[in-house]
Image (tube, rainbow, N blue to C red):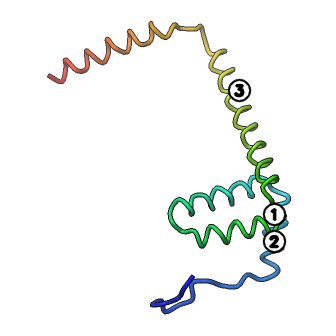
Amino acid sequence: MSNEGKPYPTTMAQTRDFKETVAARVKSDPAFAQALLDEALTLFIGGDSDTAKLILRDLANAGCGLESLESIQNVEQAAKLKALREAIAVGRASGPDIEAAEVFDRLEVRLLAMAQNRE
């Protein structure tokens, strides 16, 4: 990271208190650790690898190795799967089943009518 051509510093040293705060939060809040990981990936994809590396360093310093990150992702995936299953159950309980072919046939009739009204 270079400050060339910039009138202000682009980096700032982290204080011990900040590092400890991040480490404690990562250890106690898997969603926070996942959010940091998501942000690092977004930054890498966006081309800001320097900032992404800093975030990954914070995760590593917090003792969040690859195994920990994997378990965080597994917990998050399990939560999403549970929510999806609950949504499916709510949908199934909302009324009688309708065959997909019937739904698509009705949709096709409506779309054709809309297209004819535009002409």
Quadrant in the picture for the C terminus = top left
Q: Nearer the viewer, residue 108 or 78?
A: 78
Mark 3 neighbour class, 10 Å CA radius: few under 14, some 14 to 19, many 20 or more: few
In what element is the residue under mark 3?
helix
In what element is the residue under mark 2?
helix
Give residue 63's position: percent from left, percent from top.
84, 64
Residue bearing the label numbered 3: 86
Give residue 77's position: percent from left, percent from top.
72, 39
Mark 1 neighbour class, 10 Å CA radius: few under 14, some 14 to 19, many 20 or more: some
Q: Amino acid at mark 3?
A: Glu
Residue at 73%, 70% (x, y): give it. Answer: 57
Residue bearing the label numbered 1: 25
Residue bearing the label numbered 2: 21
Look at the numbered discs 2 and 1 and tell me whether their residues touch, using CB distance below 8 Å: yes
Q: Amino acid at mark 1?
A: Arg
Mark 2 neighbour class, 10 Å CA radius: few under 14, some 14 to 19, many 20 or more: few
